């Protein structure tokens, strides 16, 4: 029989006095007319006062947890209001105890509604499991600023933004109040509840609920909130715990002992750590697992039968054969970047926000071995004579590593993950990174063989955008891609991929991007795509754009479209060409047709902010005009006619 689940929701107060408790209590009463409702007060927010009930006896919770009374008996002891709402107070209890108790009684109710003043440790995990969260703020500036801070707090706890609804309480009906709420909090309110101070005060002082009354302005807003909660998806909550993907499970001492004996033990069994074929890897994994299980039985019998044994075995196998604690992080689609500061610090970027993963390597040598496993298959090396390296994983993820003596805290590793899903222009439009009009403009520009430079800061999404723009190139044209570490993945069939090469151990044999650009000119390309211009190759790229290779694409780091042109000047000078600035600017104005500037906002969202045309020279100044520019979070047309596409 399928379990029905419970709708879990929460009212979070942006600031004391916002009215979250009043709305929560009255909304609970509306729902209790037809369904079983439990109201949970995590922070003594005076819900019991509004309902005229005594606070829940702490012993009810503790006796249930130690098995003295059953969950069913505990439910019968929870105070109940005449409206049908049961009231549970958890303030002052240990967070783990409170949440464990909730998980034991949840299924007895259709709705469980939490009232929260501060989304801290006690209520944080409850909020992560809710079906919906209503953040209540009033139109005053302090309350709205606090609402913005609470939103950031919720997002940092991996709570999806779509789950959170902003409620503007004490709303006076003025458009300015709505504008302020959206501007200060960072998002417009989904609900407004009209101000009625007299009725609210009477309700608080008399203990009479407002729900169901037609003589005040609050009832309509409360009914809308209740209707929204009814549409939320029920959840099955058996226990509340931290997300397993970010939980460090290993016993480091036991792992260290087994690691030290694993290699000698495997040699005794005549098992060789080699073989790249899938069947070889599967057999090796099976033999290593058997060896680790056997070592566990001798080294840590007290863990062998515990619930942690399986997790520990998997961790040791990953460390012996794979990338150790990074394996699960690489497999997590919600993580876009992995940053290993040292063996004990592994941070990740999830949904644009950086957090400590809680994972760690057992030693510097294990971390260094992990780095070597990454760089060796792509022909790179890392050691004291070459302590920095750029590489890539088999899926295209970008890797940078630096080790002592340059990294003082030990080996350091950064992995920018390659998206498993190949993004299209439709994905950019759906995410709000670009508009249909701007996408159509870029399509026409590529088909018209205009030279395009994609600019932006680190991590702004330049390579991803370049990949998408390059998909507009017709399939019958010969494309040569040039990168320091191959990341582009073009859909066309007529593509030649070139990758730069670092010097060997004797310091010889290096092939730079500039060398590859010059060589590409002899390969009869229709288009040249340089993954990123960082130095003197910018001069050769300009020459290519000016000598019959129209429609070429590249990226570079800059802070604005105007800064992009200045950066090109600087990089041309880095080529060692003793040219006057006027000559460089003439070359730039002639070669570059369009600058597409990409930025990453504070909340992690990436999007195009400018599409700028280079329209020529006037004196010593390169003339530009913005065809599209970001305004209020949206890319808008400026109204300037595109001179390039009319040529």
Image: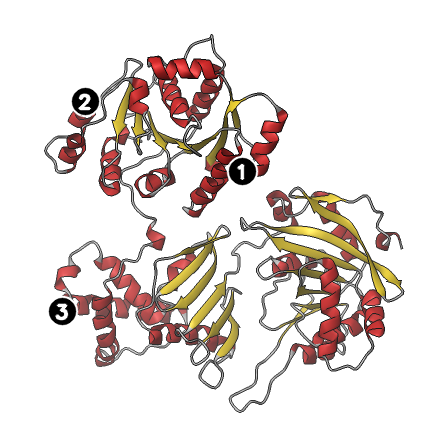
Is 243 positioned to the left or the right of 473 in the image?
left
- Name the quadrant containing residue 431: top right
Q: Nearer the viewer, residue 207 or 281?
A: 207
- The residue drawn where x is 18% and y is 66% is 296
Distance from the alpha carbon under mark 3 to that under mark 1: 58 Å
- Which is closer to the viewer, label 1 or label 2? 1
Sooner in the amino-acid sequence: mark 3 or mark 1: 1
Q: Nearer the viewer, residue 576 or 262?
A: 576
Distance from the alpha carbon under mark 1 to that under mark 2: 41 Å
- Which is closer to the viewer, label 3 or label 1? 1
- The residue drawn where x is 72% and y is 72% is 570
- Name the quadrant containing residue 503: bottom right
Could you say which disc has been placed on residue 185 in the image? 1
Per the image, the residue denoted by label 3 is: 298
Circles 3 and 1, Cβ within 8 Å, touching? The answer is no
> How far across and how far down the image is residue 257, in percent?
21, 72
- The residue drawn where x is 50% and y is 77% is 388
Work out whether residue 547 can be spotted. Answer: no
> How far across and how far down the image is residue 100, in percent?
23, 39
> How far across and how far down the image is residue 567, in percent?
71, 68
Vertical placement of residue 594 versus 512, above or below:
above
The colour scheme used to paint the residues is secondary structure
- The residue drawn where x is 51% and y is 19% is 195
Could you say which disc has been placed on residue 76 in the image? 2
Q: Nearer the viewer, residue 496 or 561?
A: 561
Sooner in the amino-acid sequence: mark 1 or mark 2: 2
Q: Quadrant of the N terminus?
A: top left
> How far across and how far down the image is residue 281, in percent?
36, 69
Sooner in the amino-acid sequence: mark 3 or mark 2: 2
- Name the quadrant containing residue 44: top left
Q: What SS does tag 1 mark?
A: helix
Q: Residues within 10 Å of mark 2 (few under 14, many from 20)?
A: few
């Amino acid at each position: 029989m399928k379990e029905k689940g419970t709708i879990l929701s929460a009212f979070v107060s942006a600031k004391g006095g916002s009215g979250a408790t009043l709305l929560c209590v009255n909304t609970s009463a509306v729902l209790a007319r037809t369904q079983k409702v439990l109201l949970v007060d995590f922070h003594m927010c005076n819900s019991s006062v509004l309902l005229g009930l005594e606070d829940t006896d702490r012993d009810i919770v503790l006796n249930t947890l130690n098995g003295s009374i059953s969950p069913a008996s505990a439910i019968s002891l929870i105070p109940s209001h005449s409206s049908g709402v049961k009231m549970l107070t958890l303030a002052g209890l240990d967070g783990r105890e409170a949440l464990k108790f909730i998980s034991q009684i949840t299924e007895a109710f259709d709705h469980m509604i939490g009232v929260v003043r501060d989304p801290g440790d006690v209520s944080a995990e409850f909020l992560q499991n809710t079906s919906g969260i209503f953040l209540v703020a009033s139109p005053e500036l302090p309350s709205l600023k606090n609402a913005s801070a609470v939103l950031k707090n919720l997002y940092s706890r991996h709570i999806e933004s779509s789950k959170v609804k902003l409620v503007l309480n004490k709303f006076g009906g003025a458009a300015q109040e709505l504008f302020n709420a959206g501007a200060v909090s960072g998002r417009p309110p989904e609900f407004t509840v009209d101000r009625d101070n007299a009725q609210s005060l009477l309700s608080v002082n008399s203990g009479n609920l407002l729900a169901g009354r037609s003589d005040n302005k609050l009832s309509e807003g409360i009914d809308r909130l209740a209707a929204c909660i009814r549409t939320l998806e029920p959840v099955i909550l058996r226990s509340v715990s931290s997300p397993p993907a970010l939980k460090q499970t290993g016993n480091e001492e036991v792992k260290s002992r087994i690691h030290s004996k694993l290699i000698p033990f495997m040699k005794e069994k005549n098992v060789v750590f080699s073989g790249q074929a899938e069947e070889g890897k599967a057999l090796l994994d099976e033999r290593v697992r058997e060896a680790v299980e056997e070592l566990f039985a001798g080294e840590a019998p007290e863990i062998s039968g515990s619930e942690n044994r399986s997790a520990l075995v998997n961790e040791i196998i990953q460390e012996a054969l794979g990338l150790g604690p990074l394996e699960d992080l690489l497999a997590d689609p919600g993580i876009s970047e992995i940053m290993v500061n040292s063996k004990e610090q592994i941070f990740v970027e999830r949904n644009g926000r950086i957090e400590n993963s809680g994972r760690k390597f057992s030693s510097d040598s294990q971390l260094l071995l992990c780095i070597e496993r990454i760089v060796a298959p792509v022909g790179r090396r890392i050691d004291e004579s070459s302590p920095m390296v750029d590489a890539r994983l088999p899926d295209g993820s970008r890797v940078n590593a630096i080790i002592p003596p340059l990294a003082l805290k030990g080996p350091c590793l950064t992995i920018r993950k390659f998206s498993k899903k190949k993004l299209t222009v439709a994905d950019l439009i759906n995410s709000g990174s670009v508009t249909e009009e701007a996408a159509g403009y870029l399509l026409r520009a590529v088909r018209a063989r205009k030279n395009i430079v994609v600019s932006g800061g680190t991590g702004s999404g330049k390579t991803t955008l370049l990949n998408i723009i390059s998909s507009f190139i017709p399939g019958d044209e010969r494309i040569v891609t040039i990168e320091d570490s191959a990341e582009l993945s073009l859909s066309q069939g007529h593509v030649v991929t070139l990758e730069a090469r670092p010097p060997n151990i004797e310091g010889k044999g290096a092939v730079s991007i500039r060398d590859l650009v010059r060589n590409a000119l002899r390969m009869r390309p229709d288009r040249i795509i340089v993954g990123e211009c960082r130095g003197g190759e910018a001069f050769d790229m300009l020459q290519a754009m000016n000598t019959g290779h129209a429609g070429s694409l590249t990226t570079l780091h800059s802070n604005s479209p105007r800064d992009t042109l200045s950066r090109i000047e600087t990089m041309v000078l880095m080529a060692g060409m003793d040219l006057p600035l006027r000559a460089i600017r003439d070359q730039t104005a002639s070669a570059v047709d369009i600058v597409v500037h990409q930025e990453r906002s504070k909340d992690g969202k990436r999007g195009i902010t400018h599409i700028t045309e280079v329209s020529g020279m006037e004196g010593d100044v390169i003339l530009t005009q913005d065809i599209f520019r970001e305004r209020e979070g949206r890319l808008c047309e400026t109204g300037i006619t595109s001179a390039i596409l009319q040529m």
